[in-house]
């Protein structure tokens, strides 16, 4: 558990440095892949692919409601983000800290980089991603759910820009 906290603290330091050096924005995603080197893939959830696909596909019907109009490069970027974050948070941290604490840490990591209402609210989908991981036993489930949720969110806020402005307001002490 201590090793998990130390590795998480390293992520927070990198996220803080990116706030001051945006050109290094790729570093957190590389860092989140460290568990692939330290931990056997099986323990990270690289198993039960059929069940992972089933749970991970639950949000895909949202594309019928709001298909993404985003360019292919952005869509691929979102897949990379989902893979890195889910390996780190669900595959690595969730077995150490449980779903509730991992979701808190997930939200905190987003808040450090983007101190907005939206970052605070990622706590709730994080609970869903953790539940899917625990039920399916596969990292594929939260990766697909995360990817789908990100694309749906992008389509949704494109449709409702006034809601996007509210969600992207910076959280301040005042």
Image: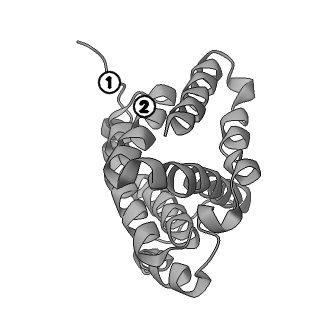
* Relative image position of residue 166 (x, y in whole percent): 30, 37
* Relative image position of residue 155 (x, y in whole percent): 47, 60
Which residue in the structure is indicated by mark 2?
A: 111
Question: What's the residue at 41%, 52% (across, down)?
Answer: 157
**Residue 160 versus residue 108: which sits nearer the camera?**
108
Number of residue marks: 2
* Relative image position of residue 38 (x, y in whole percent): 72, 48
Extreme-front residue of the structure: 2
- Of the numbered discs 2 and 1, the one sitting upstream in the chain is 2
Label of residue 171 in the image: 1
* Callout in the foreground (2, 1): 2
* CB within 8 Å, label 2 to label 1: yes
**Residue 23 versus residue 16: which sits nearer the camera?**
16
Residue 105 visible within the image: yes
Mark 2–mark 1 distance (CA, rounded to whole Å): 9 Å
In the displayed structure image, the side of residue 160 where residue 70 appears, left or right: right
Residue 122 visible within the image: no
Q: How packed is label 2: few (under 14 Cα within 10 Å), some, or many (20 or more)? A: many
Question: What's the residue at 41%, 34% (across, down)?
Answer: 108
In the displayed structure image, the side of residue 132 where residue 71 appears, left or right: right
């Amino acid at each position: 558990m201590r090793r998990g906290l130390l590795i998480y603290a390293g992520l927070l330091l990198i996220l803080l440095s990116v706030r001051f050096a945006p050109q290094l924005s790729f570093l957190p995603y590389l860092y989140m892949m460290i568990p692939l080197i330290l931990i056997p893939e099986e323990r990270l959830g690289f198993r039960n692919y059929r069940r992972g696909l089933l749970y991970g596909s639950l949000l895909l019907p949202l594309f019928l409601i709001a298909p993404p109009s985003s360019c292919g490069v952005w869509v691929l970027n979102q897949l990379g983000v989902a893979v890195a974050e889910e390996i780190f948070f669900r595959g690595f941290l969730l077995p150490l800290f449980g779903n509730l604490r991992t979701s808190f840490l997930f939200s905190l990591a987003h808040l450090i980089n983007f101190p907005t209402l939206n970052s605070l609210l990622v706590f709730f989908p994080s609970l869903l991603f953790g539940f899917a991981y625990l039920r399916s036993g596969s990292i594929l489930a939260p990766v697909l759910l995360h990817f789908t949720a990100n694309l749906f969110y992008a389509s949704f806020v494109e449709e409702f820009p006034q809601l996007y402005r509210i969600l992207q307001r910076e959280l301040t002490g005042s």
